[in-house]
């Protein structure tokens, strides 16, 4: 595969992931509301109707931005998308009840992906690469900490997954042990992806695990909650973008890095 083909595959992977995130976040707001609605209504004191109007307006704005992201010069749309995703992250942090301090990091791949897309569209590959590295590292690190702290929802995912896939009930003690191991591995790969080397095996594993855990939301909650799975597509697409960028010879300015 040629260098230019790898570049195109990488940027289109990221464009597609950010566009799908727009669709998913918009669908969640229109179907059952998002964190901004909860924050403005319950915490800030807005009326429910006013908060709904803002979220619905943002939802339609995201749907307009989604196709625009396919245009190379669509950095204003990507900037707006990143701004809203960051705003929603702040709102989710403010309304969270279980270790909400981890929320900004856990969602880092989501709100940094559009910023990395802007950098890639401007042929600034090095900044884009590090935005992608930092974003996915934050997501895996914070999800790893949630697993080590035994997030009750993650335990439910494992128990439910055992029932659906193996037809057997996984005991909670077993689930917590497995969850701890998963958490330690997540933290390890989060730190590894920040090493200034092209660790392709790490990126491959993160992409695979990111897509699998996103799909687990549908397994656990059913197809009716597809936005919850689709809005996590960046968890797999961001490391996949890195893997594609690293599938060609390194640029001259990155000579201090060595291949895996």
Image (spheres, rainbow, N blue to C red):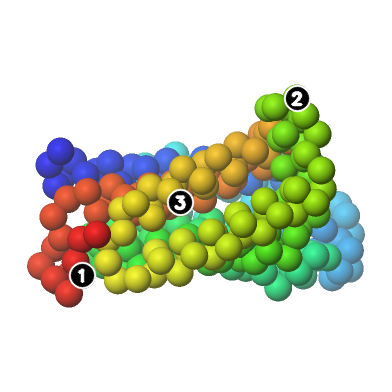
Q: Is residue 155 above or below residue 47?
A: above
Q: Residue 167, which numbered label?
A: 2
How many marks can you see?
Answer: 3
Residue depicted at x 39% and y 70%: 194
Q: Residue 257, which numbered label?
A: 1
Furthest-top residue in this view: 167
Residue depicted at x 14% and y 63%: 251
Front one among 185 and 29: 185
From the image, state whether disc 2 or disc 3 is nearer to you.
2
Q: Quadrant of residue 158?
A: top right
Front one among 218 and 4: 218
Return the disc, 2 or 1, that comes first in the chain's sequence.
2
Q: Which quarter of the figure is the N terminus placed in?
A: top left
Residue depicted at x 69% and y 32%: 219
Find numbered disc 2 in the image and state the secondary structure of the residue it sits on.
loop
**Residue 149 position within the rendered picture, expressed as x and y whole percent measured from the top left:** 73, 65
Q: Residue 206, which numbered label?
A: 3
Return the disc, 1 or 3, that comes first in the chain's sequence.
3
**Residue 12 position within the rendered picture, expressed as x and y whole percent measured from the top left:** 33, 42
Q: CA distance from mark 2 to mark 3?
A: 27 Å
Residue depicted at x 67% and y 51%: 178
Q: CA distance from mark 1 to mark 3?
A: 20 Å
Find numbered disc 1 in the image and state the secondary structure of the residue it sits on.
loop
Is there CB contact under 8 Å for labels 2 and 3? no
């Amino acid at each position: 595969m040629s260098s230019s083909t790898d570049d195109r595959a990488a940027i289109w992977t990221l464009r597609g992931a950010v566009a799908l995130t727009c669709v998913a976040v918009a669908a969640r707001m229109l179907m059952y509301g998002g964190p901004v609605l909860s924050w403005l209504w319950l915490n800030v004191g807005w009326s429910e109707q006013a908060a709904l109007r803002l979220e619905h307006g943002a939802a339609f704005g995201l749907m307009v931005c989604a196709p625009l992201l396919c245009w190379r010069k669509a950095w204003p749309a990507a900037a707006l998308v990143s701004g809203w995703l960051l705003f929603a992250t702040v709102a989710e942090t403010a309304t969270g009840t279980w270790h909400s301090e981890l929320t900004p990091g856990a969602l880092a791949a989501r709100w940094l992906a559009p910023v990395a897309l802007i950098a890639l569209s401007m042929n600034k590959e090095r900044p884009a690469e590090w935005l992608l590295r930092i974003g996915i590292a934050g997501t895996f690190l914070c999800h790893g900490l949630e697993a080590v702290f035994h997030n009750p929802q993650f335990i439910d995912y494992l128990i439910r997954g055992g029932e659906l896939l193996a037809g057997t009930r996984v005991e909670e003690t077993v689930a917590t042990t497995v969850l701890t191991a998963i958490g330690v591995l997540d933290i390890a790969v989060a730190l590894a992806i920040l090493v200034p080397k092209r660790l392709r095996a790490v990126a491959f594993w993160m992409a695979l695990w990111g897509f699998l855990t996103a799909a687990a939301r549908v397994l656990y909650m059913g197809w009716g909650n597809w936005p919850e799975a689709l809005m996590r597509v960046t968890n797999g697409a961001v490391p996949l973008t890195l893997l594609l960028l690293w599938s060609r010879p390194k640029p001259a300015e990155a000579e201090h890095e060595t291949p895996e």
